[in-house]
Amino acid sequence: MRRIWGGAGGSGLGSHDALFKDARLSVSARGLAVYLLLLPDGALPDPRVLATRPGESVESITGYLDELATAGYLTRVLGRNARGDAIEEVRLAANPGEHAAAAGRPFRWALPGRPVGD
């Protein structure tokens, strides 16, 4: 299992449990952050696929990502891939502000709500 906080030999949480204690975040936004942070290296999550889970939609997933960005856990950069498709590059960290030092975990996906190729 991937460790997303705590040093070697630590409890896993230690003083890095800001994500769980942050009252600005919904339980769903926290869960999405933990899910993404625990993915194996090289994983290519897609918010449109996550939106197919029961009770979720592209709008709800986008809302959770917005919550994480507003709280400082996620940074976004819009761009294009080699084929010219609109993509979003994000950096997600277990602690707010970590991304400023480029410590967050990078992800890239097609923009939610836009089919690839547009």
Image (cartoon, rainbow, N blue to C red):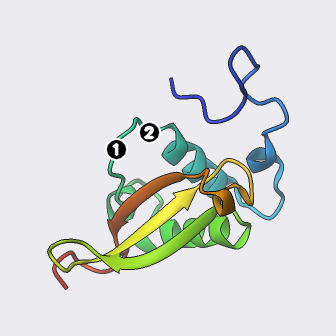
Q: Is residue 38 left or right of residue 72?
A: left
| Residue 43 image label | 1
* Total numbered labels: 2
Residues under labels 1 and 2: Cα distance? 6 Å
Q: Residue at x 14, y 74 (%)?
A: 83
Task: Establish if 96 lies above or below 84.
Answer: above
Q: Label 1: how many residues lie within 10 Å, few (<14), some (14-19) or many (20+)?
A: few
Q: Label 2: how many residues lie within 10 Å, few (<14), some (14-19) or many (20+)?
A: few
State which quarter of the image contains the C terminus.
bottom left
Q: Position of residue 12 (x, y in %)?
A: 71, 25
Q: Amino acid at mark 2?
A: Leu
Q: Is residue 94 left or right of residue 49?
A: right
Q: Position of residue 50 (x, y in %)?
A: 39, 56
Element at label 2:
loop
Check contact, mark 1 vs mark 2: CB within 8 A.
Answer: yes
Looking at this view, is 79 or 29 the one in front? 79
Q: Residue at x 36, y 75 (%)?
A: 111
Task: Establish if 101 lies above or below 78.
Answer: above
Regarding residue 57, the answer to whether it shows in the image is no
Q: Residue furthest front?
A: 101
Q: Residue at x 49, y 66 (%)?
A: 61
Regarding residue 17, the answer to whether it shows in the image is yes
Q: Mark 2 — residue?
A: 39
Q: Residue at x 67, y 47 (%)?
A: 94
Q: Would you identify the image quadrant in which residue 41 lies?
A: top left
